[in-house]
Image: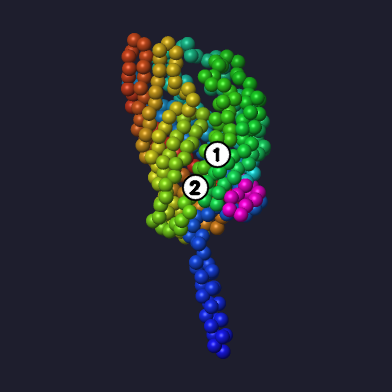
Amino acid sequence: MRVRFVGLIVATLLATTLGSGCNPDKNKLLFKPQPNAKQSVDTEDVMNFSINLMGVQLGFGAATESSFEMIPQSVDESGTVTLEVIFKSMKVELTGLDALMGSMPGRGASATVTTDDPQGLKAMHAAVKTVEGQSFTATVSKFGEVLEVRGADALSEKAAAAYKAPKGLPSPPVPIRTTFRESLGDDAMKNTLAHVFVARPDKKLRAGDNWQGTMTRANAFVEATQATTFTVKERAGGVVTVDSLAQVDIRPHGDLLGSGGNGFDVTLEISGQGAGTMQFDETTGWLKDWTGTGTIPGNISVKAPQLGSQSLPIELSYKSVVKTVPI
């Protein structure tokens, strides 16, 4: 009888120790999708600038929309997930840039382009369509860190080869292959996916807990670096809601506002804070929704012959959105 009683006590202790109440991963925000469970992913980045140039208020901006279908292929012993990422579409729009360039010294009539595609975006979209439906591979840790992207460089090379420059469009400041790789290549896609998965810490996360992270996002217009503090707002109904507060630093992407020749030069500095809210599915760890916004002050320094140096205040408003849903 005593042996049976001791056995019952030991069994109870083991059950308590090994049960879900002492699960070392409980309350961690892990990425653990089901293999072959498809997920539709849409991202959007909108940036609008406002500048007062010699008494004239000018606005210009950029918007990039991308869509993917992601399929978890396997999960290894460490919890690292290998995904097939199917590229569905990418669309870039630039607004107000012609007016801005035409208003700047050295960028007037001599920079006029006689084509119905002055930014080359129609040609770019046509080239991007040649790789829609094709895929690359991404590996993501169980903590949401994007470890590697493979195969996106090949998509960028194919799109670049398909690009046909509009007649009358001046030669771009950087090679077309570089432009497409910066938009579609392995590094570009790794940066994009970092915002889709969002790296989380190896610790239990309850309401009020926080962690730090740094991410980079780029489009055809600018590159933004975000040093972000993530704070858990609540865990309820199978959803983890997290607030984000980011220190955002913006710089031109490529030679967008670089030297215009004839001694004309422009530099851009923008730095400030943005905030957002995201929701994670607690069971799978997929980011369901993230919207971040901010209005950030900055400065443009202009150097031009006969005009000397001028400093112009500028304001950036931005919006970044990520949405994912099971298919």
* 132, 108: nearer the viewer: 132
* 179, 94: nearer the viewer: 179
Q: What amino acid is found at the position of numbered circle 1 in the picture?
A: Lys
Label ID, residue 190: 1
CA separation in Å, label 2 and label 1:
12 Å
| Residue with the most extreme bottom position | 1
- Left or right side of 131 for 236: left
Is residue 47 magenta-colored? no
* Placement of 20 over or under 250, stated as above or below: below
Q: Residue at x 42, y 11 (%)?
A: 262
Q: Residue at x 55, y 35 (%)?
A: 187
Q: Residue at x 65, y 39 (%)?
A: 135
Q: Quadrant of the N terminus?
A: bottom right
Is residue 108 something that shows in the picture? no
Pointer 2 residue: 199
SS of the residue under disc 1: helix
Find out whether the residues at labels 2 and 1 contact each other: C-beta distance under 8 Å. Answer: no
SS of the residue under disc 2: loop
Q: What amino acid is found at the position of numbered circle 2 in the picture?
A: Ala
Is residue 81 magenta-colored? yes
Q: Residue at x 35, y 33 (%)?
A: 297
Crowdedness near tag 1: few (<14), some (14–19) or many (≥20) residues, C-alpha within 10 Å? many
- Left or right side of 36 for 205: left
- Left or right side of 131 for 204: left
Give the magenta part as a residue range.
69-82
* Placement of 23 over or under 9, stated as above or below: above
From the top left corner, tell me how far across and down residue 192 is, in percent.
Answer: 53, 39
